[in-house]
Amino acid sequence: MKLFNTLTHEREEFVPRTPGKVSMYTCGPTVYHYAHIGNLRSYIMEDVLEKYLRFTGLDVKRVMNITDVGHLTSDGDTGDDKMLKGAIREHKTVMEIADFYTKAFFADCAKLNIKTPDVVQPATGCIDEFIKVISSLIEKGFAYEAGGNIYFDTSKLKKYYVFGDVTEDDLEVGVREGVEEDGNKRNKADFVLWFTKSKFNDQELKWESPWGLGYPGWHIECSCISMKYLGEYLDLHCGGIDNAFPHHTNEIAQSESYLGHEWCKYWFHVHHLNTKNGKMSKSKGEFLTVSLLEEKGYDPLVYRLFCLSSHYRKSLVFSYENLDNAAVAYKKLVAKIAKLTDEGELDKAEYDRLMKGFTDALDNDLNTAQGITALYDVLKSDTNGKTKLALIREFEKVLSLGLIEASAKMNEANSAEEDIPAEIAELIEQRKAARKAKDFAAADAIRDKIAEMGYIVEETRQGTKVTKKA
RNA sequence: GGCGCUAUAGCCAAGCGGUAAGGCGUGGGACUGCAACUCCCUGAUCCCCGGUCCGAUUCCGGGUGGCGCCUCCA
Protein backbone atom coordinates (compact mmCIF):
# COMPACT_ATOMS: atom_id res chain seq x y z
CA MET A 1 0.00 0.00 0.00
CA LYS A 2 1.00 3.60 -0.47
CA LEU A 3 1.22 5.92 2.52
CA PHE A 4 2.07 9.57 2.78
CA ASN A 5 5.25 9.83 4.80
CA THR A 6 5.65 13.11 6.68
CA LEU A 7 9.39 12.58 6.68
CA THR A 8 9.68 12.73 2.89
CA HIS A 9 6.42 14.55 2.11
CA GLU A 10 5.64 11.89 -0.46
CA ARG A 11 3.34 9.00 -0.94
CA GLU A 12 5.55 5.98 -0.69
CA GLU A 13 5.03 2.27 -1.01
CA PHE A 14 4.98 0.96 2.54
CA VAL A 15 7.69 -1.69 2.82
CA PRO A 16 8.42 -2.96 6.33
CA ARG A 17 12.02 -3.62 7.22
CA THR A 18 11.38 -7.28 7.96
CA PRO A 19 9.19 -8.80 5.24
CA GLY A 20 5.77 -9.69 6.57
CA LYS A 21 6.20 -7.95 9.90
CA VAL A 22 5.38 -4.43 10.97
CA SER A 23 6.52 -2.64 14.09
CA MET A 24 4.11 0.16 14.79
CA TYR A 25 4.18 2.77 17.52
CA THR A 26 1.45 5.16 18.51
CA CYS A 27 1.68 8.11 20.84
CA GLY A 28 -0.92 7.45 23.49
CA PRO A 29 -2.93 9.84 25.60
CA THR A 30 -1.82 11.99 28.49
CA VAL A 31 -4.26 10.73 31.06
CA TYR A 32 -5.11 13.90 32.93
CA HIS A 33 -8.59 14.29 31.51
CA TYR A 34 -11.11 12.62 29.20
CA ALA A 35 -10.11 12.19 25.59
CA HIS A 36 -12.15 14.41 23.34
CA ILE A 37 -13.50 13.30 20.00
CA GLY A 38 -10.72 15.15 18.20
CA ASN A 39 -8.12 13.06 20.01
CA LEU A 40 -10.13 10.03 19.16
CA ARG A 41 -10.15 10.85 15.47
CA SER A 42 -6.45 10.05 15.45
CA TYR A 43 -6.96 6.78 17.25
CA ILE A 44 -9.77 5.80 14.92
CA MET A 45 -7.65 6.42 11.83
CA GLU A 46 -4.66 4.64 13.33
CA ASP A 47 -6.93 1.74 14.17
CA VAL A 48 -8.02 1.54 10.55
CA LEU A 49 -4.39 1.67 9.45
CA GLU A 50 -3.39 -1.12 11.80
CA LYS A 51 -6.34 -3.26 10.78
CA TYR A 52 -5.71 -2.70 7.11
CA LEU A 53 -2.07 -3.68 7.45
CA ARG A 54 -3.24 -6.87 9.11
CA PHE A 55 -5.88 -7.29 6.42
CA THR A 56 -3.17 -7.34 3.78
CA GLY A 57 -1.52 -10.20 5.64
CA LEU A 58 1.13 -8.34 7.61
CA ASP A 59 1.94 -9.37 11.15
CA VAL A 60 1.63 -6.12 13.10
CA LYS A 61 2.98 -5.51 16.55
CA ARG A 62 1.64 -2.28 17.89
CA VAL A 63 2.79 -0.44 20.99
CA MET A 64 1.26 2.55 22.70
CA ASN A 65 2.43 4.58 25.67
CA ILE A 66 0.33 6.15 28.34
CA THR A 67 1.72 9.47 29.49
CA ASP A 68 1.22 9.53 33.23
CA VAL A 69 4.20 11.68 34.16
CA GLY A 70 6.34 14.46 32.82
CA HIS A 71 3.98 16.17 30.45
CA LEU A 72 4.20 19.82 31.31
CA THR A 73 2.17 22.63 29.87
CA SER A 74 5.47 24.05 28.69
CA ASP A 75 8.65 22.22 27.86
CA GLY A 76 10.85 24.42 29.95
CA ASP A 77 11.14 24.09 33.67
CA THR A 78 8.33 26.53 34.03
CA GLY A 79 5.12 24.87 32.96
CA ASP A 80 2.62 23.09 35.09
CA ASP A 81 2.56 19.33 35.24
CA LYS A 82 -0.65 18.27 33.54
CA MET A 83 -1.12 15.26 35.74
CA LEU A 84 -0.62 17.26 38.88
CA LYS A 85 -3.03 19.88 37.68
CA GLY A 86 -5.61 17.16 37.08
CA ALA A 87 -5.04 15.75 40.54
CA ILE A 88 -5.47 19.13 42.20
CA ARG A 89 -8.58 19.81 40.15
CA GLU A 90 -10.21 16.59 41.31
CA HIS A 91 -8.71 16.29 44.78
CA LYS A 92 -7.14 12.97 43.99
CA THR A 93 -3.63 11.60 43.80
CA VAL A 94 -1.78 11.59 40.50
CA MET A 95 -1.94 7.83 40.31
CA GLU A 96 -5.69 7.83 40.89
CA ILE A 97 -6.10 10.35 38.11
CA ALA A 98 -3.91 8.30 35.77
CA ASP A 99 -5.79 5.12 36.54
CA PHE A 100 -9.20 6.71 36.16
CA TYR A 101 -8.53 8.41 32.84
CA THR A 102 -6.64 5.48 31.39
CA LYS A 103 -9.70 3.33 31.96
CA ALA A 104 -11.94 6.05 30.58
CA PHE A 105 -9.77 6.27 27.46
CA PHE A 106 -9.99 2.57 26.69
CA ALA A 107 -13.71 2.56 27.45
CA ASP A 108 -14.15 5.27 24.80
CA CYS A 109 -11.96 3.32 22.40
CA ALA A 110 -14.08 0.21 22.95
CA LYS A 111 -17.24 2.13 22.08
CA LEU A 112 -15.60 3.28 18.88
CA ASN A 113 -14.42 -0.24 18.00
CA ILE A 114 -10.80 0.78 18.39
CA LYS A 115 -8.67 -2.26 19.10
CA THR A 116 -6.37 -2.03 22.09
CA PRO A 117 -2.72 -2.15 20.96
CA ASP A 118 -0.69 -5.29 21.63
CA VAL A 119 1.36 -3.46 24.23
CA VAL A 120 0.17 -0.54 26.34
CA GLN A 121 2.89 0.89 28.54
CA PRO A 122 2.54 3.67 31.09
CA ALA A 123 5.59 5.92 31.23
CA THR A 124 5.98 5.44 34.97
CA GLY A 125 6.71 1.77 34.35
CA CYS A 126 9.87 2.42 32.33
CA ILE A 127 11.94 4.81 34.44
CA ASP A 128 14.96 2.51 34.33
CA GLU A 129 14.96 2.56 30.54
CA PHE A 130 14.74 6.33 30.48
CA ILE A 131 17.71 6.63 32.82
CA LYS A 132 19.70 4.17 30.72
CA VAL A 133 19.11 6.08 27.49
CA ILE A 134 19.67 9.50 29.06
CA SER A 135 22.95 8.30 30.62
CA SER A 136 24.09 7.07 27.24
CA LEU A 137 23.16 10.35 25.57
CA ILE A 138 25.23 12.24 28.13
CA GLU A 139 28.15 9.86 27.55
CA LYS A 140 27.94 10.35 23.80
CA GLY A 141 27.92 14.10 24.24
CA PHE A 142 24.34 14.69 23.11
CA ALA A 143 23.07 15.83 26.48
CA TYR A 144 24.22 18.18 29.22
CA GLU A 145 23.31 19.16 32.72
CA ALA A 146 22.25 22.71 33.48
CA GLY A 147 20.52 24.14 36.47
CA GLY A 148 19.92 20.64 37.81
CA ASN A 149 18.12 19.39 34.71
CA ILE A 150 19.39 17.26 31.86
CA TYR A 151 18.90 18.74 28.38
CA PHE A 152 19.30 17.34 24.91
CA ASP A 153 21.79 19.41 22.90
CA THR A 154 20.25 19.94 19.48
CA SER A 155 23.35 21.69 18.18
CA LYS A 156 25.13 18.33 18.13
CA LEU A 157 22.87 17.08 15.35
CA LYS A 158 23.53 17.25 11.64
CA LYS A 159 19.85 17.84 11.09
CA TYR A 160 17.29 18.58 13.74
CA TYR A 161 14.22 19.90 11.90
CA VAL A 162 13.35 16.76 10.00
CA PHE A 163 9.73 17.41 9.05
CA GLY A 164 10.08 20.80 7.47
CA ASP A 165 12.72 22.91 5.80
CA VAL A 166 13.36 25.26 8.69
CA THR A 167 16.23 26.62 10.64
CA GLU A 168 16.21 27.68 14.23
CA ASP A 169 16.12 31.33 13.24
CA ASP A 170 12.88 30.81 11.38
CA LEU A 171 11.10 29.87 14.54
CA GLU A 172 9.47 32.58 16.47
CA VAL A 173 9.78 32.16 20.15
CA GLY A 174 6.90 32.98 22.36
CA VAL A 175 4.35 33.02 19.56
CA ARG A 176 1.97 31.40 21.91
CA GLU A 177 0.99 33.25 24.98
CA GLY A 178 2.29 32.06 28.28
CA VAL A 179 5.39 30.36 26.96
CA GLU A 180 8.56 31.31 28.72
CA GLU A 181 12.02 30.48 27.59
CA ASP A 182 14.11 28.31 29.81
CA GLY A 183 17.35 30.15 30.48
CA ASN A 184 19.24 26.94 31.17
CA LYS A 185 19.14 25.88 27.56
CA ARG A 186 22.20 26.29 25.38
CA ASN A 187 20.13 26.32 22.21
CA LYS A 188 16.64 27.44 21.58
CA ALA A 189 15.48 24.00 20.49
CA ASP A 190 17.06 22.01 23.33
CA PHE A 191 14.62 20.06 25.43
CA VAL A 192 14.51 18.47 28.84
CA LEU A 193 15.28 14.79 29.26
CA TRP A 194 15.18 14.72 33.04
CA PHE A 195 13.99 17.22 35.63
CA THR A 196 15.38 17.47 39.11
CA LYS A 197 14.90 21.13 39.80
CA SER A 198 11.29 21.85 39.63
CA LYS A 199 9.21 24.58 41.02
CA PHE A 200 6.77 21.92 42.11
CA ASN A 201 7.67 20.98 45.60
CA ASP A 202 4.58 18.86 45.74
CA GLN A 203 5.43 16.87 42.61
CA GLU A 204 4.23 13.48 43.77
CA LEU A 205 6.10 11.23 41.41
CA LYS A 206 9.87 11.30 41.76
CA TRP A 207 12.54 8.74 41.14
CA GLU A 208 16.19 8.36 42.08
CA SER A 209 18.56 8.98 39.20
CA PRO A 210 22.29 9.62 38.73
CA TRP A 211 21.34 13.32 38.56
CA GLY A 212 19.25 13.39 41.67
CA LEU A 213 15.66 12.82 42.61
CA GLY A 214 13.41 13.79 39.75
CA TYR A 215 11.21 12.78 36.87
CA PRO A 216 11.48 12.34 33.11
CA GLY A 217 10.71 14.83 30.35
CA TRP A 218 7.87 14.16 28.01
CA HIS A 219 9.68 13.14 24.80
CA ILE A 220 11.98 10.48 26.20
CA GLU A 221 9.17 8.09 27.07
CA CYS A 222 8.05 7.41 23.51
CA SER A 223 11.57 6.70 22.29
CA CYS A 224 12.31 4.35 25.16
CA ILE A 225 9.01 2.53 25.18
CA SER A 226 9.21 2.00 21.46
CA MET A 227 12.75 0.64 21.64
CA LYS A 228 11.95 -1.56 24.62
CA TYR A 229 9.21 -3.44 22.79
CA LEU A 230 10.00 -2.97 19.12
CA GLY A 231 13.78 -2.84 19.05
CA GLU A 232 16.19 -0.55 17.27
CA TYR A 233 14.17 -0.21 14.11
CA LEU A 234 10.63 1.04 13.86
CA ASP A 235 8.58 0.76 10.69
CA LEU A 236 5.76 3.12 11.44
CA HIS A 237 5.19 5.86 13.97
CA CYS A 238 1.75 7.45 14.28
CA GLY A 239 0.30 10.45 16.00
CA GLY A 240 -1.61 13.67 15.58
CA ILE A 241 -0.09 16.25 13.25
CA ASP A 242 0.44 18.70 16.09
CA ASN A 243 2.97 16.28 17.54
CA ALA A 244 5.23 16.39 14.51
CA PHE A 245 6.99 19.31 16.11
CA PRO A 246 8.36 19.30 18.71
CA HIS A 247 7.44 15.90 20.08
CA HIS A 248 8.27 13.63 17.16
CA THR A 249 11.17 15.78 16.06
CA ASN A 250 12.62 15.35 19.53
CA GLU A 251 11.95 11.64 19.54
CA ILE A 252 13.94 11.27 16.36
CA ALA A 253 16.76 13.43 17.72
CA GLN A 254 17.22 11.41 20.88
CA SER A 255 16.53 7.99 19.39
CA GLU A 256 18.90 8.31 16.48
CA SER A 257 21.60 9.90 18.61
CA TYR A 258 21.30 7.02 21.03
CA LEU A 259 21.16 4.30 18.38
CA GLY A 260 23.63 5.79 15.94
CA HIS A 261 21.46 4.97 12.93
CA GLU A 262 18.14 5.76 11.33
CA TRP A 263 15.28 4.78 13.61
CA CYS A 264 11.84 5.03 12.06
CA LYS A 265 11.14 5.02 8.35
CA TYR A 266 7.50 6.03 8.03
CA TRP A 267 5.67 8.77 9.90
CA PHE A 268 1.89 8.78 9.78
CA HIS A 269 0.18 11.92 11.02
CA VAL A 270 -3.54 12.40 11.38
CA HIS A 271 -4.85 15.92 10.84
CA HIS A 272 -7.17 17.70 13.19
CA LEU A 273 -10.80 17.72 13.96
CA ASN A 274 -11.87 21.34 13.97
CA THR A 275 -14.88 23.27 14.97
CA LYS A 276 -15.86 26.46 13.24
CA ASN A 277 -13.45 28.20 15.59
CA GLY A 278 -10.48 26.00 14.80
CA LYS A 279 -8.87 23.05 16.48
CA MET A 280 -10.78 21.29 19.21
CA SER A 281 -8.43 21.27 22.14
CA LYS A 282 -8.55 20.67 25.82
CA SER A 283 -6.62 23.76 26.71
CA LYS A 284 -9.25 25.88 25.01
CA GLY A 285 -11.75 24.56 27.51
CA GLU A 286 -14.83 23.37 25.71
CA PHE A 287 -14.47 19.93 24.20
CA LEU A 288 -16.69 17.06 23.17
CA THR A 289 -16.42 13.58 24.56
CA VAL A 290 -17.85 10.27 23.45
CA SER A 291 -20.12 10.23 26.48
CA LEU A 292 -21.52 13.59 25.52
CA LEU A 293 -22.36 12.33 22.04
CA GLU A 294 -24.07 9.35 23.58
CA GLU A 295 -26.09 11.61 25.85
CA LYS A 296 -27.23 13.47 22.77
CA GLY A 297 -28.41 10.20 21.31
CA TYR A 298 -25.63 9.39 18.88
CA ASP A 299 -24.17 5.94 18.53
CA PRO A 300 -20.38 6.35 18.88
CA LEU A 301 -20.02 4.32 15.71
CA VAL A 302 -21.80 7.10 13.84
CA TYR A 303 -18.85 9.27 14.80
CA ARG A 304 -16.52 6.57 13.50
CA LEU A 305 -18.37 6.62 10.17
CA PHE A 306 -18.12 10.40 10.16
CA CYS A 307 -14.34 10.16 10.55
CA LEU A 308 -13.97 7.42 7.97
CA SER A 309 -15.88 9.33 5.35
CA SER A 310 -13.08 11.87 5.25
CA HIS A 311 -9.38 11.45 4.58
CA TYR A 312 -7.05 11.33 7.58
CA ARG A 313 -4.75 13.95 6.10
CA LYS A 314 -7.43 16.56 5.75
CA SER A 315 -8.73 18.64 8.58
CA LEU A 316 -12.29 17.75 9.32
CA VAL A 317 -14.86 20.20 10.60
CA PHE A 318 -17.16 18.87 13.26
CA SER A 319 -20.73 20.08 13.44
CA TYR A 320 -23.91 18.41 14.57
CA GLU A 321 -25.27 18.94 11.09
CA ASN A 322 -22.44 16.82 9.69
CA LEU A 323 -22.87 14.22 12.40
CA ASP A 324 -26.59 14.01 11.68
CA ASN A 325 -25.71 13.41 8.07
CA ALA A 326 -23.54 10.49 9.15
CA ALA A 327 -26.24 9.20 11.50
CA VAL A 328 -28.78 8.98 8.67
CA ALA A 329 -26.24 7.37 6.36
CA TYR A 330 -25.38 4.85 9.08
CA LYS A 331 -28.99 3.94 9.70
CA LYS A 332 -29.68 3.44 6.02
CA LEU A 333 -26.56 1.34 5.63
CA VAL A 334 -27.61 -0.91 8.48
CA ALA A 335 -31.14 -1.23 7.10
CA LYS A 336 -29.81 -2.28 3.71
CA ILE A 337 -27.50 -4.87 5.22
CA ALA A 338 -30.27 -6.19 7.46
CA LYS A 339 -32.22 -7.14 4.37
CA LEU A 340 -29.46 -9.32 2.98
CA THR A 341 -29.61 -13.08 3.40
CA ASP A 342 -26.78 -15.54 3.18
CA GLU A 343 -28.26 -17.31 0.20
CA GLY A 344 -26.80 -18.43 -3.09
CA GLU A 345 -23.38 -19.44 -4.24
CA LEU A 346 -20.45 -17.11 -3.83
CA ASP A 347 -20.01 -15.15 -7.05
CA LYS A 348 -16.23 -15.24 -7.29
CA ALA A 349 -15.78 -12.84 -10.18
CA GLU A 350 -18.02 -10.17 -8.66
CA TYR A 351 -16.49 -10.75 -5.24
CA ASP A 352 -13.02 -10.14 -6.65
CA ARG A 353 -14.10 -7.07 -8.55
CA LEU A 354 -15.76 -5.46 -5.53
CA MET A 355 -12.94 -6.47 -3.22
CA LYS A 356 -10.51 -4.78 -5.56
CA GLY A 357 -12.50 -1.58 -5.29
CA PHE A 358 -12.01 -1.69 -1.54
CA THR A 359 -8.32 -2.61 -1.50
CA ASP A 360 -7.50 -0.08 -4.23
CA ALA A 361 -9.07 2.60 -2.03
CA LEU A 362 -7.23 1.65 1.14
CA ASP A 363 -3.97 1.00 -0.71
CA ASN A 364 -4.15 4.58 -1.84
CA ASP A 365 -2.93 6.31 1.28
CA LEU A 366 -5.71 4.84 3.39
CA ASN A 367 -8.54 6.40 1.44
CA THR A 368 -11.34 5.44 3.79
CA ALA A 369 -13.86 7.75 2.12
CA GLN A 370 -13.38 5.77 -1.06
CA GLY A 371 -13.52 2.59 1.00
CA ILE A 372 -16.98 3.57 2.21
CA THR A 373 -17.97 4.09 -1.41
CA ALA A 374 -16.72 0.57 -2.13
CA LEU A 375 -19.16 -0.59 0.54
CA TYR A 376 -22.02 1.18 -1.23
CA ASP A 377 -20.89 -0.42 -4.47
CA VAL A 378 -21.31 -3.82 -2.84
CA LEU A 379 -24.84 -3.01 -1.74
CA LYS A 380 -25.74 -1.75 -5.19
CA SER A 381 -24.30 -4.71 -7.07
CA ASP A 382 -26.84 -7.18 -8.52
CA THR A 383 -24.98 -10.13 -7.09
CA ASN A 384 -26.50 -12.38 -4.41
CA GLY A 385 -26.69 -11.91 -0.65
CA LYS A 386 -24.02 -14.45 0.11
CA THR A 387 -21.45 -12.61 -1.96
CA LYS A 388 -22.42 -9.26 -0.54
CA LEU A 389 -22.34 -10.41 3.05
CA ALA A 390 -19.01 -12.12 2.55
CA LEU A 391 -17.56 -8.86 1.28
CA ILE A 392 -19.11 -6.74 4.00
CA ARG A 393 -17.75 -9.06 6.67
CA GLU A 394 -14.29 -8.66 5.18
CA PHE A 395 -14.55 -4.86 4.87
CA GLU A 396 -15.71 -4.71 8.46
CA LYS A 397 -12.44 -6.26 9.63
CA VAL A 398 -10.96 -2.91 8.68
CA LEU A 399 -13.80 -0.40 8.93
CA SER A 400 -15.20 -1.82 12.19
CA LEU A 401 -18.43 0.12 11.93
CA GLY A 402 -20.43 -2.57 13.70
CA LEU A 403 -22.69 -2.91 10.66
CA ILE A 404 -23.21 -6.66 10.88
CA GLU A 405 -24.04 -6.47 14.58
CA ALA A 406 -26.35 -3.49 14.14
CA SER A 407 -28.21 -5.13 11.26
CA ALA A 408 -28.62 -8.34 13.24
CA LYS A 409 -30.04 -6.30 16.08
CA MET A 410 -32.40 -4.59 13.69
CA ASN A 411 -33.63 -7.92 12.39
CA GLU A 412 -34.06 -9.16 15.91
CA ALA A 413 -36.15 -6.14 16.81
CA ASN A 414 -38.26 -6.65 13.71
CA SER A 415 -38.97 -10.27 14.48
CA ALA A 416 -39.52 -9.83 18.18
CA GLU A 417 -43.26 -9.31 17.96
CA GLU A 418 -43.85 -11.95 20.58
CA ASP A 419 -42.05 -9.68 23.03
CA ILE A 420 -44.65 -6.98 22.57
CA PRO A 421 -46.67 -6.65 25.79
CA ALA A 422 -50.26 -7.81 25.63
CA GLU A 423 -51.66 -4.32 26.20
CA ILE A 424 -49.70 -2.99 23.22
CA ALA A 425 -50.83 -5.89 21.09
CA GLU A 426 -54.39 -5.15 22.09
CA LEU A 427 -54.02 -1.50 21.06
CA ILE A 428 -52.58 -2.56 17.74
CA GLU A 429 -55.61 -4.73 17.10
CA GLN A 430 -57.86 -1.79 17.96
CA ARG A 431 -55.92 0.40 15.59
CA LYS A 432 -56.19 -2.15 12.81
CA ALA A 433 -59.94 -2.22 13.29
CA ALA A 434 -60.11 1.57 13.27
CA ARG A 435 -58.12 1.72 10.04
CA LYS A 436 -60.33 -0.86 8.45
CA ALA A 437 -63.33 1.24 9.39
CA LYS A 438 -61.45 4.25 7.94
CA ASP A 439 -61.61 5.98 11.27
CA PHE A 440 -58.14 7.48 10.84
CA ALA A 441 -58.48 9.97 13.65
CA ALA A 442 -58.93 7.11 16.09
CA ALA A 443 -56.13 5.12 14.44
CA ASP A 444 -53.73 8.07 14.79
CA ALA A 445 -54.74 8.58 18.39
CA ILE A 446 -53.96 4.97 19.17
CA ARG A 447 -50.63 5.25 17.38
CA ASP A 448 -49.77 8.26 19.55
CA LYS A 449 -50.77 6.35 22.64
CA ILE A 450 -48.57 3.42 21.66
CA ALA A 451 -45.71 5.83 21.03
CA GLU A 452 -46.13 7.22 24.53
CA MET A 453 -45.79 3.68 25.83
CA GLY A 454 -42.47 3.32 24.06
CA TYR A 455 -43.33 1.54 20.82
CA ILE A 456 -43.29 2.67 17.23
CA VAL A 457 -45.97 1.58 14.79
CA GLU A 458 -45.24 1.75 11.07
CA GLU A 459 -47.09 0.56 8.00
CA THR A 460 -44.61 -1.23 5.78
CA ARG A 461 -45.16 -3.09 2.55
CA GLN A 462 -45.28 -6.27 4.58
CA GLY A 463 -47.96 -4.93 6.92
CA THR A 464 -47.99 -3.32 10.33
CA LYS A 465 -44.61 -3.24 12.04
CA VAL A 466 -44.13 -2.63 15.73
CA THR A 467 -40.75 -1.92 17.25
CA LYS A 468 -39.61 -0.90 20.66
CA LYS A 469 -38.13 2.57 20.77
CA ALA A 470 -34.36 2.56 20.98
C1' G B 1 7.51 36.24 9.78
C1' G B 2 8.98 30.88 8.66
C1' C B 3 7.34 25.89 7.64
C1' G B 4 3.53 22.23 6.44
C1' C B 5 -1.31 20.55 4.75
C1' U B 6 -5.44 22.07 2.00
C1' A B 7 -9.22 24.62 -1.77
C1' U B 8 -14.36 20.12 -6.11
C1' A B 9 -22.36 21.17 -6.04
C1' G B 10 -26.55 23.46 -0.01
C1' C B 11 -23.31 20.11 3.34
C1' C B 12 -19.60 15.87 3.60
C1' A B 13 -16.48 13.90 -0.15
C1' A B 14 -13.70 10.78 -4.38
C1' G B 15 -10.68 11.92 -8.35
C1' C B 16 -3.28 11.15 -9.50
C1' G B 17 -3.42 14.02 -17.74
C1' G B 18 -8.41 12.16 -21.83
C1' U B 19 -13.83 16.60 -20.77
C1' A B 20 -16.57 15.41 -12.91
C1' A B 21 -17.76 8.73 -8.11
C1' G B 22 -20.46 8.22 -3.72
C1' G B 23 -23.25 9.83 0.74
C1' C B 24 -26.63 13.42 3.19
C1' G B 25 -30.01 17.19 2.07
C1' U B 26 -33.40 19.68 -1.59
C1' G B 27 -37.12 19.27 -5.43
C1' G B 28 -40.28 15.85 -8.40
C1' G B 29 -42.49 10.96 -8.87
C1' A B 30 -44.13 5.60 -7.42
C1' C B 31 -46.20 3.32 -2.99
C1' U B 32 -49.25 4.90 1.35
C1' G B 33 -55.70 7.14 4.63
C1' C B 34 -51.52 10.16 6.80
C1' A B 35 -46.60 9.64 8.44
C1' A B 36 -42.37 6.60 8.23
C1' C B 37 -39.74 2.99 5.24
C1' U B 38 -38.34 1.62 0.30
C1' C B 39 -37.58 2.56 -4.92
C1' C B 40 -36.96 5.93 -9.37
C1' C B 41 -35.64 10.82 -11.26
C1' U B 42 -33.13 15.55 -9.94
C1' G B 43 -27.62 19.11 -9.28
C1' A B 44 -20.79 21.53 -10.70
C1' U B 45 -17.56 25.51 -16.99
C1' C B 46 -13.55 21.59 -10.05
C1' C B 47 -10.62 29.38 -5.74
C1' C B 48 -7.94 33.03 -9.27
C1' C B 49 -3.95 34.21 -12.96
C1' G B 50 -0.15 32.40 -15.99
C1' G B 51 2.70 28.06 -18.13
C1' U B 52 3.58 22.87 -20.15
C1' C B 53 0.68 19.58 -23.30
C1' C B 54 -3.14 17.59 -28.96
C1' G B 55 -5.73 17.78 -24.22
C1' A B 56 -5.42 19.97 -17.00
C1' U B 57 -9.89 19.56 -11.78
C1' U B 58 -5.43 16.55 -12.20
C1' C B 59 1.47 18.64 -13.66
C1' C B 60 4.58 23.43 -13.00
C1' G B 61 4.97 28.79 -11.41
C1' G B 62 2.56 32.89 -8.98
C1' G B 63 -1.52 34.70 -6.15
C1' U B 64 -5.70 34.38 -2.66
C1' G B 65 -8.53 31.87 1.20
C1' G B 66 -8.85 27.94 5.15
C1' C B 67 -6.43 24.91 8.84
C1' G B 68 -2.15 23.45 11.59
C1' C B 69 2.90 23.91 13.76
C1' C B 70 6.85 27.34 15.48
C1' U B 71 8.36 24.42 22.80
C1' C B 72 0.40 22.39 26.27
C1' C B 73 -2.09 19.60 22.42
C1' A B 74 -4.21 13.83 18.74
Image (cartoon, coloured by chain):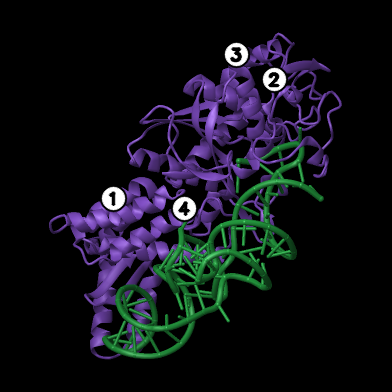
Chain colours: A purple, B green
> For the residue labelled by badge 1, is the local secondary structure a helix, a strand or a loop?
helix
- Residue at 53 percent across and 48 percent down: it is A41
> For the residue labelled by badge 2, is the local secondary structure a helix, a strand or a loop?
strand
Total labels: the figure holds 4
Name above or below for residue A433 compared with residue A90.
below
- Quarter residue A208 falls in: top right
Say yes or no: labels 4 and 1 on the same chain: yes
Can residue A251 be seen at all in this image of the molecule? yes
Q: Quadrant of the N terminus of chain A?
A: top left
Identify the mark nearer the N-term, 2 or 3. 3
User: How far separated are the C-alphas under marks 2 and 4?
Assistant: 37 Å
* Amino acid type, residue under disc 3 in the picture: Asp
- Quarter residue A186 falls in: top right
Residue highlighted by disc 2:
A215
* Amino acid type, residue under disc 4 in the picture: Arg
Identify the mark nearer the N-term, 3 or 4. 3
Say yes or no: labels 2 and 1 on the same chain: yes
Q: What mark, if any, has residue A393 been given in the picture?
A: 1
